[in-house]
């Protein structure tokens, strides 16, 4: 099992999702029991649908539990906070648009561009990794090359 790097916030979100899935699994178990009492299971669409939902929930729970078991919380790691790594909040100046941008580098599961959280696997994040504050970096993005000045690197 390989390490799964995640922020504290992402870890807590996964734990909450597991709890919600456990509750949903319990409800579906009751539903399966009720539909089983209705007779012939071969022709019972409600039973088949409930079993399928139960199977999907169990699969999702197993995936999340595996992530939690191998989780390395970025806040707890001894990393060089001068360099951009997962968990860093980076303030950039885009030389092309003259805009200031702020992004937090997170796992693909936690990515939410609307909240300024970009996946560590994105082209922008890949171009930023390992760089330091006050440096300039040219990053090849899908539509164009851009030059960014790294204004700030923070770990919150």
Image (cartoon, rainbow, N blue to C red):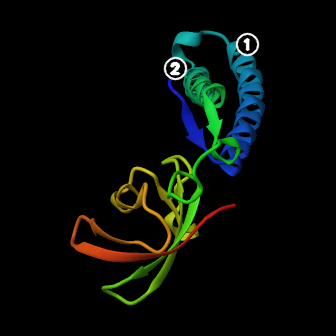
Element type at mark 1 = loop
Q: State the mark number for residue 64.
A: none
In the rendered view, does 86 fall on the left or right side of 25?
left
Q: Residue at x 51, y 53 (%)?
A: 85
Write down the residue under mark 1.
37
Q: Quadrant of residue 155?
A: bottom right
Of the numbered discs 1 and 2, the one sitting upstream in the chain is: 2
Q: Residue at x 54, y 29 (%)?
A: 3
Q: Residues within 10 Å of mark 1 (few under 14, many from 20)?
A: few
Quadrant of the snapshot with the C terminus? bottom right
In the rendered view, does 77 fall on the left or right side of 127?
right
**CB atoms of marks 1 and 2 within 8 Å:** no
The residue nearer to you, when weighing 81 against 143, is 81
Position of residue 105 measured from the top left corner of the image (x, y, whole percent)? 52, 57
Count of labels in the image: 2
Marks 1 and 2, Cα distance to the nearest angstrom? 41 Å
Write down the residue under mark 2.
1
Q: Residue at x 77, y 26 (%)?
A: 26
């Amino acid at each position: 099992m390989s390490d799964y790097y995640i922020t504290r916030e992402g870890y807590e979100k996964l734990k909450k999702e597991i709890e919600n899935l456990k509750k949903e699994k319990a409800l579906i178990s009751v539903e399966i029991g009720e539909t089983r009492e209705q007779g012939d299971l071969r022709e019972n669409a409600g039973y088949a649908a409930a079993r399928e939902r139960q199977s999907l929930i169990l699969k999702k729970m197993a995936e999340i539990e595996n992530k939690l078991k191998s989780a390395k919380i970025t806040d707890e790691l001894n990393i060089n906070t001068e360099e951009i790594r997962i968990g860093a909040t980076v303030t950039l100046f885009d030389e092309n648009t003259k805009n200031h941008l702020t992004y937090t580098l997170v796992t693909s599961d936690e990515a939410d561009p609307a909240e300024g959280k970009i996946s560590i696997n994105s082209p922008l994040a890949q171009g930023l990794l390992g760089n330091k504050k006050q440096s300039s970096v040219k990053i090849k993005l899908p539509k164009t090359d851009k030059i960014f000045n790294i204004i700030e690197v923070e770990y919150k």
